[in-house]
């Protein structure tokens, strides 16, 4: 059986919605291919207000754009995007680009 190329999940990174739909988990390299797969498989209406970024090892401009879109969705709903413990390299990138003002970093749940 062959997989549809349009929806095949990238192997180097992932953006996955948890079963309850309340958390988006980012891991590995978040690039254009990973973001494209996410957008093809998860409707914007299902995008949660909380993102776990602890497993991110790299984020391209496409990944940054995804964070901006997630934050805008929450702002339109009167809320704020929460990003769980972005790693130091991602925090530095977000600060350098000014995107650290777009959402709130929060600690991981105990």
Image (tube, rainbow, N blue to C red):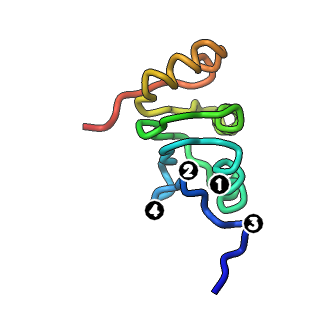
Task: Give the labeled residue for mark 3.
Answer: 6
Task: Name the residue: 50% across, 21% down.
Answer: 91
Q: Is label 4 in a helix, a strand or a loop?
A: loop
Q: Is residue 70 above or below residue 43?
A: above
101 up-or-down from 54: above or below:
above
Q: Position of residue 107 (x, y in %)?
A: 35, 28
Q: Which numbered dot is residue 38?
A: 1
Residue 15: numbered disc: 2
Please report contact status of discs 3 and 2: CB closer than 8 Å, yes or no.
Answer: no
Return the residue nearer the eye: 27 or 16.
27
Query: Which label lies toward us, 3 or 2?
Result: 3
Q: Nearer the viewer, residue 22 or 9?
A: 9
| Residue at the spot of label 4 | 19
- Mark 3–mark 1 distance (CA, rounded to whole Å): 11 Å
Quadrant location of the N terminus in the rendered image: bottom right
Relative to residue 59, is residue 72 drawn left or right?
A: right
Question: Please, which residue is most extreme toward the bottom here?
Answer: 1
């Amino acid at each position: 059986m062959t997989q549809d190329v349009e929806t095949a999940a990238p192997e180097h990174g992932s953006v996955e919605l948890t079963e309850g739909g309340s958390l988006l988990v980012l891991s590995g390299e978040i690039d254009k291919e990973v973001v494209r797969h996410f957008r093809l498989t998860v409707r914007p209406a299902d995008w949660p207000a909380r993102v776990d970024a602890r497993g991110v090892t790299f984020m391209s401009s496409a990944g940054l754009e995804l964070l901006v879109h997630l934050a805008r969705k929450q702002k339109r709903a009167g809320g704020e995007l929460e990003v769980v413990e972005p790693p130091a390299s991602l925090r530095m990138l977000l600060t350098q680009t000014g995107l650290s003002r777009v959402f709130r970093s929060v600690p991981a749940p105990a």
